[in-house]
Image: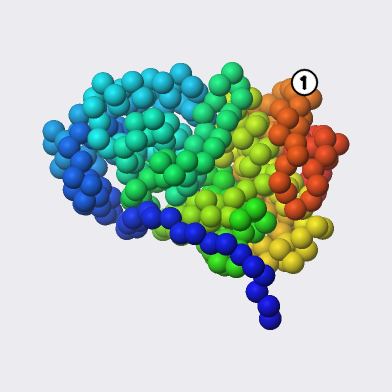
Amino acid sequence: MTIDPFLYSSRAVDVRFGRGRAADNVRDCIEAHDARRVLVVATRSQTATADRLTAELGDRVVARFADVREHVPASTADAARRTAAEAEADLVLSIGGGSTTGTAKAIVMTAGIPIIAVPTTLAGSEMTDTWGITTDGRKRTGKDPRVLPKAVVYDPSLLDGLPERLKVTSSFNAMAHCVEAFWGPRANPLTSVVAAEGVRRLADGLRAHGRGEARSVDELQYGSFLAGLVFADAGSGLHHKICHALGGAFDLSHAGTHTVILPRVVRFNAPTVPETAAALATALRVDDAAAGLEDLIAETSAPRTLRELGMREDELPAAVDVVAEKLPIDNPREVTREALQQLLGAAYDGKDLR
Ligand code: NAD
């Protein structure tokens, strides 16, 4: 068998995974960086976790920033940067979901200091060098090696308080990273293996979660780690373009949008990449990838339509416009404005669902 030419470059992230080990691992990471002036970024819902994880750091913690908002509005990025500058922070400790990690990334883009990330959702941002900032309803994203955390501390027990719905939708956010990694612009033989393993772990974890198995979150978090890793390596396509455009413009839940859009994009691309669709189906342990994802979403009572996420029908034309602004989109199958109309129309009211 021949191997097609490919490029691969690895990134240096110190990853520490362990249930119940977050406090020790955070302390070790801070000491390894010899940080003396730590800025903690964590939302108010994570205050107790942040207190616990920083208890041993004493006066090394010099400031906190809690005013995190989803999709990182430019005003939030400015406020967080001011806090870091006033505190003369030499390291950002981010404890929270993708919005918290995103705020930490906005800080270090200008401050040039390291991030240690402790994720409390399954979004996967902690493993990527991608930032996103929203100005006037338009979310801009970009890659910058400075925003990649230097260390990531995974501890599944930190997800205990995550609301049920977010646990599931955040898993589909991670699943989307793996799925797009199959056809991302920098996909290579290694990313396909990692993506398949991530899909398998996430699908198994979601099914175990549905059966009420408490430790299912360990599998989900391991899957989300693989997902963030492979998303950073392989890049993304139509699915992420749609989710970022809609999230920024209509302030929709990021994880919920991923859940609703993913099976539609898979169904759209599958005829163009049948071998990939088959590999995806195998990893999901189903016969048809798009239908299998729809079933998994239904089984886990996750949202299936944009209407359920709070989008109004009269916003649909604007939704098509905001995604069409991104055309041409790097994706296995050519994306036209008509295709977007059809895909988003179906995603809005679920008329394509069985
Ligand atoms: P989020 O960070 O906005 O968190 C959602 C809500 O859950 C918040 O209210 C938060 O306080 C709360 N929360 C988080 N963890 C909790 C826990 N363990 N227990 C209880 N409550 C908890 O949501 P998200 O889905 O993690 O992140 C979405 C954002 O991340 C989007 O802006 C998205 O664009 C970004 N993102 C970026 C990348 C990247 O590579 N740059 C990847 C994935 C997501």
Residue at 63 percent of width and 42 percent of height: 240
> Could you say which is closer to the camera, residue 22 or residue 152?
152
Q: Residue 99, relative to residue 159: is it above or below?
A: above
Residue at 43 percent of width and 24 percent of height: 77
> Could you say which is closer to the camera, residue 162 or residue 301?
162
Residue at 53 percent of width and 55 percent of height: 233
Residue 4 as seen in the image, left or right of residue 172? right
The image shows residue 125 at horizontal and vertical percentages of 47, 44
**Kind of residue sitting beneath label 1:** Asp
Residue 264 visible in the current orientation: yes
The image shows residue 313 at horizontal and vertical percentages of 76, 24
Q: Quadrant of residue 137?
A: top right
Q: Residue 83, relative to residue 299: is it above or below?
A: above
Graded by Cα atoms within 10 Å as few (under 14), some (14 to 19) or many (20 or more), the crowding at tag 1 reads few
The image shows residue 263 at horizontal and vertical percentages of 71, 49
The image shows residue 284 at horizontal and vertical percentages of 63, 63
Residue at 82 percent of width and 35 percent of height: 337
Q: Quadrant of residue 186?
A: bottom right
| Residue to which mark 1 is pinned | 314
